[in-house]
Image (tube, helix red, strand yellow):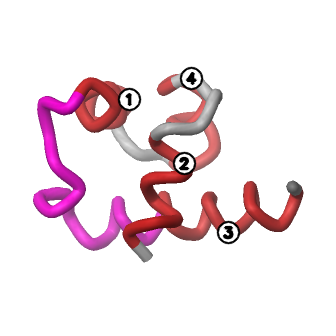
Amino acid sequence: MRAVIESVIFSNESSYDIYKHTGVNQGMISDLKDGYRSIDYICYVDAEKLYNYGKVLLSAS
């Protein structure tokens, strides 16, 4: 699960684009990208949204 979430966070998509597709707070996504926040400390609901979006991105590749 972690690897899929990291693939979303560190993809070429902007924080805003990830937010539009997942509903996860744009500021939190930016904090994850910039290293101010760890994936270990995000809530399960947000992790699940990012994971599901990551599966969509990986299947499109």
Residue tagged by mark 2? 8
Q: Residue at x 46, y 42 (%)?
A: 9
The crowd level at tag 3 (other Cα within 10 Å; few <14, some 14-19, many 20+) is some
Q: Earlier in the sequence, mark 1 or mark 4?
A: 4
Q: Residue at x 88, y 58 (%)?
A: 60
Say which element carries label 4: loop
Residue tagged by mark 3? 55
Q: Position of residue 45 (x, y in %)?
A: 33, 69
Q: Nearer the viewer, residue 55 or 61?
A: 61
Where 39 falls versus 48 (above or below)? above
As drawn, the residue found furthest toward the right would be 60
Place residue 59 in its image quadrant. bottom right
As drawn, the residue found furthest toward the bottom would be 1
Say which element carries label 1: helix
The crowd level at tag 2 (other Cα within 10 Å; few <14, some 14-19, many 20+) is many
- Is residue 4 a member of the stretch shown in magenta? no
Amino acid on which disc 3 is placed: Lys
The crowd level at tag 1 (other Cα within 10 Å; few <14, some 14-19, many 20+) is some
Residue tagged by mark 4? 14
The residue segment tinted magenta is 35-49
Amino acid on which disc 2 is placed: Val
Residue depth check, mark 1 versus mark 4: number of the one nearer the observer = 4
Quarter of the figure that contains the N terminus = bottom left
Image marks 4 and 3: residues in contact by CB distance under 8 Å? no
Q: Position of residue 17 (x, y in %)?
A: 62, 29
Place residue 32 in its image quadrant. top left
